[in-house]
Image (cartoon, helix red, strand yellow):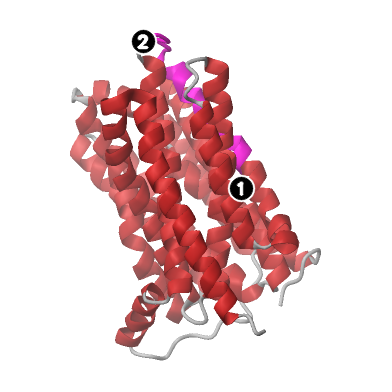
C-alpha cells in the first residue's frame, strides 16, 4: 500500500489534487456569469440559472453509474476518462448558440465531472494505507474548495472582461493539459480487484450501504452539513446586496474567498483524526459552524465575514472527516459508498436552499439562525448515533 512520504504518495496525492481542482473549477465556472448570460441570451435570471442547475443535476445523476462502472473497469481508467470527457465537453459547449443548447451541454458537463468525483476517494481508500488515506483526503477536499473558489473568481473576472466563450475555452484547454499530467503521474492501481458479479449484485451492495447505520449516518451528516453550508453563503449574498449594505453583486461574490478557511481545516483534518479521532472532529466542526452562524447575526461586515469564515472552517472539517469515514468503513464496493455519500451531499445542497431561503424570508438572518439550529441539532443527533454504533463495534 502507498505510505505517506513515498514517491507514489506524492505523485498520487498531487495528481488527484490537481484533478480535483480542475473538476470543481469547471463545475462552478458559470455560476458568477449567470447575469452576463441572462443578458446575452435575453432571458430572466431564473431561466439563466438553469445553466448552473443543470451542471449540479448532471453531477448528482452520474455519481452512482460511474461508481458502479469503476467496480468493473477500474478506478484509474474512470478517473482519466472523466477528465478527458470534461475537457471534450468544455470544447463542445462553445458551439452552443442558444440557452437550451448550453443547458444541455452543462448537463453533459455534470455527467462528465461526476466520474472523477465518484471514484477519487475510492482509489485512495484502496491504494493508500490508513494513515496515508487520512492525510490525503484532507488535501483532496482542500483542493475541492480551492477549485470552487478559483472557478468562481476566474469565471467572473475573465467572463466579464472577454466573454464566457474565451473563459470556457481556456479552462477546457487547461483541463486537457492537466489530464495528460495526471495520466503520466497517477500510479497504477495495485489493490483493485474487478467485480465479476452481476450488475444486480453491485446494485444490491450499493443499497446495502444505505441500510448500514455506520455508513448512512455519516452520509446524513454530510448531506445536512452541505445543506447548511452552501445555502448560508447563498442567503448571505442576498443579505449583502439588500439594505442597509447595498453591495454590488461583484463585491458580494467575494464572500466565497471565505472558503479558504475551509481549505485550511480540510488540510488539517487528517492530523486531527489521527490524534483525536474523526467523530470528535465532526462534532468540533459542527460547533464551530454554529458559532459562525450566530456571530453573523451582528449586522456589521466584519462580523458577517468572520461568521462565514467560521462556517466554512467548521463545514469543511465535518465534510473531510465524514467523507473519509464512509470510504474507510465501507467493507466492499467502496466507490459506490463514496458516490452515495456525495449524492446525499449534493441533494442536501439542493433541498437546503428552499429551507434556508424560506427561513430568511420569514425572519431575515434570525430566521436563518433558527432554521439552521434545527439542522445542526439533527447533525449532532446523527453524530451521537454514530458514536454509539462505534462503541458497539469496539472490543471490550
Q: Is residue 189 above or below residue 84?
A: below
> Residue 14 lies in what quarter of the image?
bottom right
The magenta stretch is: 244-262
> Residue 391 lies in what quarter of the image?
bottom right
Q: Residue furthest right?
A: 5
Relative to the observer, which residue lies in front, 69 or 80?
69
Residue displayed at 48% across by 72% down: 214
- Secondary structure category for the residue under label 2: loop
Residue contact at pointers 1 and 2, CB within 8 angstroms:
no
Q: Is residue 251 magenta?
A: yes
Q: Which residue is mark 1?
A: 142
- Secondary structure category for the residue under label 1: helix
Residue 221 percent across, percent down from the top left: 45, 57
User: Which quadrant: the N terminus?
Assistant: bottom right
Residue 3 percent across, percent down from the top left: 76, 71
Circle 2 packing at 10 Å, graded few (<14), some (14-19), many (20+), is few
> Residue 188 lies in what quarter of the image?
bottom right
Provide the major secondary structure of the magenta segment: helix
Residue 84 percent across, percent down from the top left: 46, 57
Answer yes or no: is residue 180 visible. no
Q: Is residue 110 magenta?
A: no
> Marks 1 and 2, how far apart in space?
34 Å
Give the number of the mark in front: 1 or 2.
Answer: 2
Q: Which residue is mark 2?
A: 243
1 or 2: tag closer to the N-terminus: 1
Residue displayed at 38% across by 63% down: 63
Residue displayed at 42% across by 21% down: 160
Number of the label disc, if any, that sits on residue 292: none
In the visual, does 289 lie left or right of 242? right
Residue 379 percent across, percent down from the top left: 45, 54
User: Which quadrant: the C terminus?
Assistant: bottom right
Amino acid at each position: 500500500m502507498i505510505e505517506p512520504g513515498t514517491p507514489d504518495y506524492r505523485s498520487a496525492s498531487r495528481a488527484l489534487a490537481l484533478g480535483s481542482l480542475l473538476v470543481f473549477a469547471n463545475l462552478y465556472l458559470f455560476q458568477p456569469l449567470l447575469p452576463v448570460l441572462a443578458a446575452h441570451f435575453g432571458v430572466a435570471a431564473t431561466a439563466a440559472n438553469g445553466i448552473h442547475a443543470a451542471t449540479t443535476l448532471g453531477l448528482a445523476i452520474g455519481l452512482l453509474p460511474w461508481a458502479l462502472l469503476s467496480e468493473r473497469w477500474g478506478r484509474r481508467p474512470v478517473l482519466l476518462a472523466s477528465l478527458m470527457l470534461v475537457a471534450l465537453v468544455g470544447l463542445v459547449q462553445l458551439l452552443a448558440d442558444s440557452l437550451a443548447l448550453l443547458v444541455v451541454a452543462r448537463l453533459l458537463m455534470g455527467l462528465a465531472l461526476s466520474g472523477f468525483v465518484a471514484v477519487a476517494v475510492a482509489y485512495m481508500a484502496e491504494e493508500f494505507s490508513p494513515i496515508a488515506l487520512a492525510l490525503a483526503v484532507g488535501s483532496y477536499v482542500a483542493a475541492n474548495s480551492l477549485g470552487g473558489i478559483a472557478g468562481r473568481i476566474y469565471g467572473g473576472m475573465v467572463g466579464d472582461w472577454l466573454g464566457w466563450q474565451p473563459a470556457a475555452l481556456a479552462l477546457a484547454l487547461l483541463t486537457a493539459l492537466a489530464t495528460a499530467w495526471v495520466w503520466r503521474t497517477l500510479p497504477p492501481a495495485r489493490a483493485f480487484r474487478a467485480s465479476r458479479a452481476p450488475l444486480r449484485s453491485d446494485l444490491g451492495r450499493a443499497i446495502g450501504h444505505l441500510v448500514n447505520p455506520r455508513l448512512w449516518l455519516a452520509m446524513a451528516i454530510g448531506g445536512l452539513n452541505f445543506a447548511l453550508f452552501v445555502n448560508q453563503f447563498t442567503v448571505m449574498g442576498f443579505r449583502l446586496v439588500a439594505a442597509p449594505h447595498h453591495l454590488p453583486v461583484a463585491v458580494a461574490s467575494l464572500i466565497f474567498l471565505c472558503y479558504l478557511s475551509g481549505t485550511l481545516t480540510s488540510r488539517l483534518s487528517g492530523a486531527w483524526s489521527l490524534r483525536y479521532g474523526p467523530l470528535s472532529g465532526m462534532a468540533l466542526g459542527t460547533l464551530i459552524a454554529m458559532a459562525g452562524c450566530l456571530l453573523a447575526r451582528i449586522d456589521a461586515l466584519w462580523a458577517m465575514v468572520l461568521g462565514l469564515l467560521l462556517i466554512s472552517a467548521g463545514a469543511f472539517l465535518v465534510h473531510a472527516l465524514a467523507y473519509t469515514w464512509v470510504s474507510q468503513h465501507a467493507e466492499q464496493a467502496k466507490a459506490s459508498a463514496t458516490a452515495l455519500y456525495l449524492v446525499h451531499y449534493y441533494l442536501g445542497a439542493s433541498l437546503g436552499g428552499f429551507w434556508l431561503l424560506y427561513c430568511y424570508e420569514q425572519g431575515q438572518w434570525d430566521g436563518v439562525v433558527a432554521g439552521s439550529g434545527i439542522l445542526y441539532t439533527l447533525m449532532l443527533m446523527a453524530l451521537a448515533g454514530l458514536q454509539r454504533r462505534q462503541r458497539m463495534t469496539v472490543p471490550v
